[in-house]
Structure formats: C-alpha cells, structure tokens
Amino acid sequence: MIRAATKQDIPGLAQLMGELGYPTDINEMEYRLSNILSNNAYQTYVYEEDEKLLGMIGMILCYRFEKSESYIRVVAFVVNSELRGKGIGSMLLEEAENWAKKQGAKMVTLNSGNRIERNDAHQYYIRRGFEGKATGFYKQLD
C-alpha cells in the first residue's frame, strides 16, 4: 500500500535512509521528518506491507526562474534492497508523478550520485523515461 508518510514511520524511514547509503538514527529522522511534514511544498510517500516500510519517495515542489512553470524534485527515493525489481519503486515513482501533475508541475527531476553502486539506479531511471542532462555541483558550507 502506498500512503503519505507520518511521524509513526520514523523508525522505518531511518532504516531506509541506511539502505540509501545515509545511516540515520531515529532522533535524526524525527528532526528531519518534522521539518518536512511542516512544509506544504514537500510530499513523502511510503510503500508499506504487513506494517513494514519497504520503500519511500520524498519530493519537493519547486519553481523555475527561467520558465513560468513548476517542477517536482525527487530528493529521496529508496526501496528495501531485498525487494528491488518487484515493482515497488515503479509504483512509488508513479505516485510521485501523479502528485506532480496535481501540483501543476511540468517536469520531475532527480539527482543520483556518480558512484559505481548507483549504476543500476541510473539504468532504472533511464528505463522510466528520465534523461541524464545535467551535472551537479555541491559546495559544503561551514
């Protein structure tokens, strides 16, 4: 079942962040999710089965400077590694695209690291109609 995330999902979301390569404890996840849930520009969906979170997708509604249209940026997307290839990610991505359309967004974007362990994810995104069109730059601030 896909549904909007709630504070009760914090332990499962913390575990999924670890699967994504970002080990997170429950206190950190509680802080993050409380900020996200309090901002209407964000939406987080989870895939739950037998009271266990098996996947999640988190996104934010953004506005462009260069065009008069909005877009959705996927900022977190993960499926339990033991269950990949079973359609959970596709269902979550479809739900994200539906939310984007309801928001009037004209595009969905996401970033994925240029690490070798992300190659399967990159191929998945291409199969789902995404194009690799940009290079990301990051600067850590003190």
Image: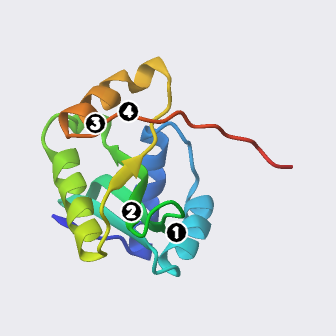
User: Disc 2 marks which amino acid?
Assistant: Tyr
Residue 71's tag is: 2
Q: Position of residue 3 (x, y in %)?
A: 24, 70
Marks 3 and 1, how far apart in space? Answer: 25 Å
From the viewer's perspective, is the residue at label 1 or at label 4 nearer?
4
Marks 1 and 2, how far apart in space? Answer: 22 Å
Question: For numbered disc 3, what is the local secondary structure?
Answer: helix
Marks 2 and 4, how far apart in space? Answer: 16 Å
Q: Residue at x 46, y 41 (%)?
A: 111
Between 69 and 24, the residue placed more toward the observer is 69
Question: For numbered disc 2, what is the local secondary structure?
Answer: strand
Question: For numbered disc 4, what is the local secondary structure?
Answer: loop
Tell me which label, 3 or 1, sits earlier in the chain: 1
What colour scheme has been applied to the protein in the rendered image?
Answer: rainbow
Neighbours of disc 4 within 10 Å: few (<14), some (14-19), many (20+):
few
Quick check: marks 3 and 4 in contact, CB under 8 Å? yes
Residue 16 vertical position relative to residue 70 in the rendered view, above or below: above
| Residue wearing tag 1 | 33
Residue 125's tag is: 3
Tell me which label, 1 or 2, sits earlier in the chain: 1
Between 18 and 110, the residue placed more toward the observer is 110
Question: For numbered disc 1, what is the local secondary structure?
Answer: helix
